[in-house]
C-alpha cells in the first residue's frame, strides 16, 4: 500500500522539476526489476525509458555530447528511484543509503568522459537523498547497449526496516 504522504526524496525531486512516473519500467528479458537481500536492494540496470519510449538512442561521442548523456543518465536515475519506491512499499524515507551506482555508457572508442556522463544519475541521487545519496560508483564504456540506448545505470541501496504497526 502506498503511503499518502510524499517522501522527502519525492518532495526534493518535485521542487527541482522531476516527477516519478506512475508505472515502473517493466523488465525487457528474463529478470526482475529489483531484489532485496537483507538490508540491501539491488536495482536492475535501467535504460532511459520515458513515457514508453527510449529517450536517447545512440552513442556518446557520435550522436550525443556529455550534456545529452547526463540528461539520459538522469532518466535512468528517475527509473531507478521509481523501482526503489516499489522496493520500499512506496516509502522512500526508508532509503538509508545509496550504496553504489554502476553506469554503462554506449560510446565511441575515443570518448573519454564517461565519468561526467554518470554525474547525471549521481547528481540526481544527491538531490533526492541528500547526504544519504552520496555513493560509490563505476562508469564503464560499452560498445553497444540494449535498444541502442546511450546509457544504462544499475544501483544498490541500503533500506531501513519498515516501521512496525
Image (spheres, rainbow, N blue to C red):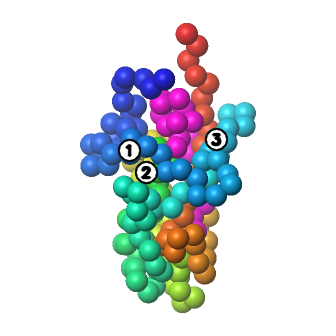
Q: Which of marks 1 and 3 is nearer the N terminus?
A: 1
Q: Which residue is drawn at 54% across and 32% down?
A: 88
Membership of 92 in magenta stretch: yes
Q: Residue at x 61, y 71 (%)?
A: 140
Q: In this view, does 89 lie above or below 48?
A: above
Segment tinted magenta in the rendering: 83-105
Residue 41 is situated, as x and y percent measured from the top left of the image, at 64, 41
Write down the residue under mark 3: 41
Whether residue 152 is visible here, answered yes or no, is yes
Write down the residue under mark 2: 78
**Cβ–Cβ below 8 Å for labels 1 and 3?**
no
Write down the residue under mark 1: 20
Q: Is mark 2 on a helix, strand or loop?
A: helix
Q: Residues within 10 Å of mark 1 (few under 14, many from 20)?
A: some
Q: What element carries label 3?
A: strand
Q: Earlier in the sequence, mark 1 or mark 2?
A: 1
**Cβ–Cβ below 8 Å for labels 1 and 2?**
yes
Position of residue 1 in the picture relative to residue 103 (left or right): left
Q: How far apart are marks 1 and 2 (CA)?
A: 6 Å
Q: What element carries label 1?
A: loop
Residue 115 is situated, as x and y percent measured from the top left of the image, at 52, 70
Residue 71 is situated, as x and y percent measured from the top left of the image, at 38, 65
Q: Is residue 144 above or below residue 53?
A: below
Amino acid at each position: 500500500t502506498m503511503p499518502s504522504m510524499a517522501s522527502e526524496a519525492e518532495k526534493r525531486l518535485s521542487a527541482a522539476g522531476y516527477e516519478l512516473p506512475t508505472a515502473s519500467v517493466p523488465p525487457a528479458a528474463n529478470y526482475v526489476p529489483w531484489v532485496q537481500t537483507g538490508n540491501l536492494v539491488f536495482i536492475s540496470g535501467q535504460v532511459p525509458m520515458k513515457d514508453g519510449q527510449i529517450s536517447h538512442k545512440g552513442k556518446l561521442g557520435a550522436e550525443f555530447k556529455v550534456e545529452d548523456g547526463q540528461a539520459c543518465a538522469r532518466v535512468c536515475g528517475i527509473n531507478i528511484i521509481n523501482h526503489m519506491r516499489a522496493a520500499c512499499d512506496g516509502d522512500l524515507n526508508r532509503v538509508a543509503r545509496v550504496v553504489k551506482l554502476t553506469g554503462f555508457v554506449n560510446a565511441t572508442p575515443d570518448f573519454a568522459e564517461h565519468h561526467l556522463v554518470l554525474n547525471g544519475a549521481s547528481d540526481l541521487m544527491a538531490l533526492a537523498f541528500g547526504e544519504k545519496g552520496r555513493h560509490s560508483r563505476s562508469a564503464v564504456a560499452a560498445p553497444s547497449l540494449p535498444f541502442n540506448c546511450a546509457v544504462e545505470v544499475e544501483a544498490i541501496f541500503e533500506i531501513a526496516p519498515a516501521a512496525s504497526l
